[in-house]
């Protein structure tokens, strides 16, 4: 029986290798063309979110000029990571050159504190503040550290060291990170989980710990962050976390539609951050806050199967707020700008299920066993199955690529940029656009397909 099964697997592998060889060549050509095109539209080495095919109109968060790049994903650091991955797969010197120039663009915009805001304007480099919102400063550091593993470059290493020093300096006494550094005298000074702020900071410090060991007091910073995660978890029966906390460790107002509350999404993210820390530091205490958090999340699910973004302290009732601090009873009562532009209800089922599975594996396998499980090498059958799935995605990537290497999103529909002082009220624009997000996604698909195809061919030999 086993002999027949092995023979069958062997025949499948032969078919995949033969039929996939042409597709792999096409994928490799597509990857090279895509890298070359996207590199050709850089701005001083950096990138925005969108540009029209004629390169005349550019967007980041709003319309941007030809002197500005985005730091916030899917902008420059995210594109730079795509270049690094392509280089690792193909050893294409253009991909490495593009990654280095993206790094130099970020280094040019690294401010006096050692970090970044969400954009860099090369005509007017800002040294006002550092933003930990939306993975802005964090993504830049992650990219520079990743590139530092590939090349020896004093400029890159110095920028990394300066950025890690910033992470430690900006960390609050309680172990958290603020929304913005240095102090602004408002809610930006608060310890902020919103949009994964603290979670991304912890991720950066874990990456730094894995890359550089305990140099630059990285482990001390991680232990301070752990303490904050512990002390900021609210007591039962609402054993979750808030989006932001004031200096008295109280859930606090941020923007006028972000009330003090318990936040399911923040809670799911913190569960995974605790497990990430457990994988590296191997401390069983990191798992202790998780069961109560999972229980609370299951209890407060809405009737429609989703979760409220904000849950009222003490009652578990969903909260909806419009500007300025106007409480609404239902989603339908909100102004279109709030109802459409902000996720007041979220589908967290898959994320919660995955987190619970991961937690149970941690209990069963321990930190070393969980790490091995999450980093296990696929066997031939698993590789074959994954390649078959990726093949269809690769064909779609090939079909949508222009002859010059660009991927153009046809008739892209997006919110209209309103004049200053005029509130958006449901207006949209439709236009063909080239997207950094689409580029990053397609590069990831092509790279994974080529990687697995190479591995399958090597194993089959």
Image (cartoon, grey):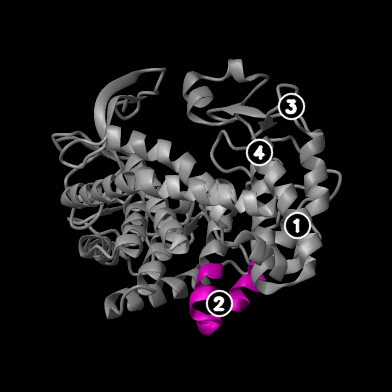
Q: Which residue is mark 3?
A: 302
The residue depicted at 50 percent of the width and 47 percent of the height is 11
Task: Place residue 413 in its image quadrant.
Answer: top left
Q: Which mark is residue 218?
A: 2
Q: Relative to 13, is 222 above or below?
A: below
Observer-side mark, 4 or 2, equals 4
Q: Relative to 179, is 354 above or below?
A: above
Q: Which residues are magenta?
A: 205-227
Q: What is the distance, in whole Å, between disc 4 and disc 3 at their CAs?
A: 15 Å
Observer-side mark, 2 or 1, equals 1
Nearer to me, 406 or 8: 8
Which badge, 2 or 1, is on the more N-terminal residue?
Answer: 2
The residue depicted at 79 percent of the width and 57 percent of the height is 289
Disc 2 and disc 3 in contact, CB within 8 angstroms: no
Label 1 SS: helix
Residue 74 seen from this side: no
Which badge, 2 or 3, is on the more N-terminal residue?
Answer: 2
């Amino acid at each position: 029986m086993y002999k027949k099964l092995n023979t069958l697997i062997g025949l499948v592998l032969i078919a995949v290798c033969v039929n996939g060889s042409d597709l792999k060549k096409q994928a490799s050509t597509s990857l090279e063309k895509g890298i070359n095109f996207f590199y050709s539209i850089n701005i001083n080495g950096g990138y925005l979110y969108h540009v029209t095919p004629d390169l005349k109109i550019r967007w980041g968060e709003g319309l941007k000029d030809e002197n500005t790049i985005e730091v916030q994903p899917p902008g420059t650091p995210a594109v730079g990571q795509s270049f690094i991955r392509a280089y690792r797969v193909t050893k294409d010197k253009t991909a490495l050159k593009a990654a280095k120039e993206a790094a130099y663009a970020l280094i040019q915009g690294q401010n006096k504190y050692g970090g970044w805001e969400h954009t860099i304007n090369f005509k007017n480099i800002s040294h006002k503040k550092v933003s930990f919102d939306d993975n802005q400063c964090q993504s830049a550091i992650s990219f520079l550290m990743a590139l530092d593993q590939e090349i020896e470059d004093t400029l890159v290493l110095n920028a990394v060291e300066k950025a890690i020093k910033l992470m430690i300096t900006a960390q609050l006494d309680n172990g958290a990170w603020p929304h913005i550094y240095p102090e602004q005298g408002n809610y930006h000074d608060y310890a902020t989980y919103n949009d994964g702020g603290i979670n991304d900071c912890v991720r950066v410090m874990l990456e730094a710990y894995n890359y550089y060991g305990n140099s630059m007091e990285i482990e001390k910073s991680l232990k301070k962050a752990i303490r904050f995660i512990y002390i900021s978890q609210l007591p039962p029966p609402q054993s979750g976390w808030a989006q932001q906390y004031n200096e008295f460790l109280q859930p606090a107002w941020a923007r006028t539609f972000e009330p003090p509350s318990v936040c399911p999404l923040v809670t799911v993210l913190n569960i995974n951050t605790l497990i990430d820390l457990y994988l590296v530091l191997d401390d069983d205490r990191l798992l202790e806050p998780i069961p109560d958090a999972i229980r609370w999340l299951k209890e407060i699910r809405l009737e429609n199967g989703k979760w409220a973004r904000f849950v009222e302290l003490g009652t578990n009732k969903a909260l909806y707020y419009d500007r300025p601090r106007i409480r609404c009873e239902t989603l339908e009562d909100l102004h279109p700008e709030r109802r459409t532009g902000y996720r007041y209800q979220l589908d967290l089922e898959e994320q919660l299920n995955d987190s619970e599975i991961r937690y149970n594996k941690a209990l069963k396998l321990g930190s070393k066993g969980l790490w091995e499980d999450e980093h296990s090498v696929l066997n031939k059958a698993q590789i074959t199955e994954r390649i078959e799935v990726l093949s269809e995605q690769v064909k779609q990537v090939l079909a949508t690529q222009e002859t010059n290497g660009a991927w153009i999103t046809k008739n892209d529909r997006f919110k209209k940029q309103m004049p200053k002082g005029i509130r958006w009220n449901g207006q949209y624009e439709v236009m063909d656009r080239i997207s950094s997000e689409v580029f990053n996604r397609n590069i990831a698909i092509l790279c994974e397909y080529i990687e697995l195809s190479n591995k399958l061919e090597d194993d089959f030999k």
